[in-house]
Amino acid sequence: MPVSEMSAVERIARVLAGQRLSINAEGDQASAGDEVDDTWRDYRDDAVAVLRTLREPDQRMAAAGDERVWEAMVRAALADS
């Protein structure tokens, strides 16, 4: 399994920025990559909020694996924030 060199907070923040900027989502920019690079930090608080929400797995997630491992991984991602 590949492991990202980017933190989970940064990856989520970049997705949120892209969603708001890119014409492929809610934005109006045909090529939003540079703008995402410049503004993703503005979405860090939103990314942290998403991760906090995901600390507890839902029933389907818990049935698929060890919920303690999931919680530990999300908490580790939050420790970087």
Image: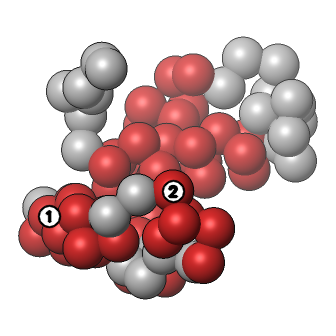
- Mark nearest the camera among 2 and 1 is 2
Asked if residue 50 shows in the view, the reply is no
Residue at (65% x, 39% y) in the render: 18
Q: Is residue 13 above or below residue 46?
A: above
Residue sticking out furthest to the front: 63
Where does the N terminus fall, quadrant-wise?
top left
Near mark 2 (Cα within 10 A), the count class, few <14, some 14-19 or many ≥20, is few
Write the residue at 33% across / 55% down. Answer: 9
Q: Quadrant of residue 73?
A: bottom left
Label 2 element class: helix
Residue underneath mark 1: 76
Is any atom of residue 17 visible in this view?
A: yes
Give above or below for 22 relative to 77.
above
Q: Is residue 34 left or right of residue 78?
A: right
Give the number of callouts: 2
**Left or right: 11 with respect to 60?**
left
Which disc, if any, is residue 64? 2
Under circle 1, the secondary element is: helix
Within 10 Å of disc 1 (Cα), the crowding (few <14, some 14-19, many 20+) is few
Residue 7 at what x, y percent from top left?
A: 24, 44
> Which residue sits at x=27%, y=27%?
4
How far is disc 2 from disc 1 in space, using C-alphas? 20 Å
Residue 35 in the image, given as x and y percentages of width and height? 55, 32
CB-based contact (under 8 Å), mark 2 and mark 1: no
Mark 1 belongs to which amino acid? Ala
Residue 2 sits above or below residue 35 on the image: above
* Callout 2 amino acid: Ala
